[in-house]
Image (cartoon, rainbow, N blue to C red):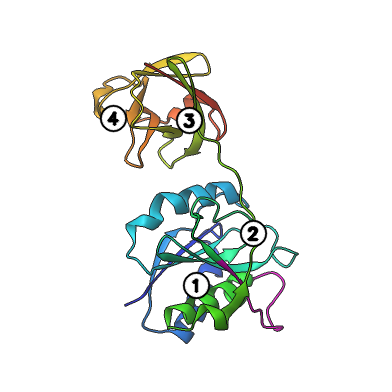
Amino acid sequence: MKVITFLSDFGTDDWFVAAVKGEILKINPCVRIVDITHDIKPYDVRGAAFVLFAVFRNFPKGSIHLAVVDPGVGGDRKPIIVRSQGQFFVGPDNGIFSRVYDASSMVYEIKVNSSASATFHARDIFGPTAARLSGGTSLSRLGKIHREYVVHETAGPTRRKNVIFGEIAYVDHFGNCITNIPNSEKITKLRVLGRMVNIIDYYSVMLSKGLAGVRGSLGYYEIARYKGNASQVLKAEPGMRVEGHE
């Protein structure tokens, strides 16, 4: 059974998510739809790109990832399908797939039916495209090669002597601040906003409500607060500078 994942900033208070799923099921009633999240901050394309990067490898090869955070809906940005790393991605060409592209990625501009609304491409274009792809329709029938696509550059950490300079890449639901410093870097402390925190083995080592660094499950160091919210303490946002010290 084919899998379509669904990620958006639609929330769950309205009919938007259900409408998209309904259009998918009309085309392929046998597909399995898995919600990643619909609680991306409104219009936060970079945040959505990080969440997609964090999870897509957990799905079987050939899965289809429908990702729609689309502040430019109805405008000049193109609707696209991406084939990359053995999987497929459907959504707007606005940088949301920046973290899944590699040297072998192929991108297709979706052929759009003139009856599509100008405000709900997830329902009228992206969902149906993902459904047809799950049913075996070829990429060449769904679109044409698209060679100039949007990629948001993601900064990597840099090293100077015994210090690694990085940044907070994402803040999760618990307030953990996920950095872009890989767990493979041998550091013992993280410094953020003038505060130095020790690296510990797991969350509950912090018996107090202080801050500490941990080697996160995604493969990057995180700054955490046991049973608390590190991002609130730090007033942290993505892009904030972090230093790793040996």
Earlier-in-chain disc, 2 versus 4: 2
- Measuring 33% from the left and 31% from the top, which residue is drawn there? 184
Q: In the rendered image, which residue does mark 3 sit on?
A: 231
**Residue 1 versus residue 40 in the image, above or below:** below
Say if 132 sits above or below 161 in the image.
below
Q: Which mark is residue 18?
A: 1
Q: Residue at x 30, y 19 (%)?
A: 208
Secondary structure beneath label 1 = helix
Q: Main secondary structure of the magenta part?
A: loop
Q: Is residue 246 left or right of residue 194?
A: left
Q: Can you give x and y, in whole percent of width and height, for residue 86 in the image?
A: 40, 64
Three-letter code, disc 4: Tyr
Give the numbered dot on residue 203: 4
First in sequence: mark 3 vs mark 1: 1
Range shown magenta: 107-120
Say which residue appears at 32% left-offset and 22% top-offset. 199
Q: CA distance from mark 3 to mark 4?
A: 15 Å
How many C-alpha atoms fall within 10 Å of the one at disc 1: few (<14), some, or many (≥20)?
Answer: few
Residue 216: x percent and y percent? 34, 36
Q: Secondary structure at mark 4?
A: helix
| Mark toward the start of the polypeptide (1 vs 2) | 1
Q: Quadrant of the N terminus?
A: bottom left
Q: Mark 2 near mark 4, Cβ–Cβ under 8 Å?
A: no
Of the numbered discs in the image, which one, if any, rests on residue 149?
A: 2
Q: Can residue 19 be seen in this snapshot?
A: no
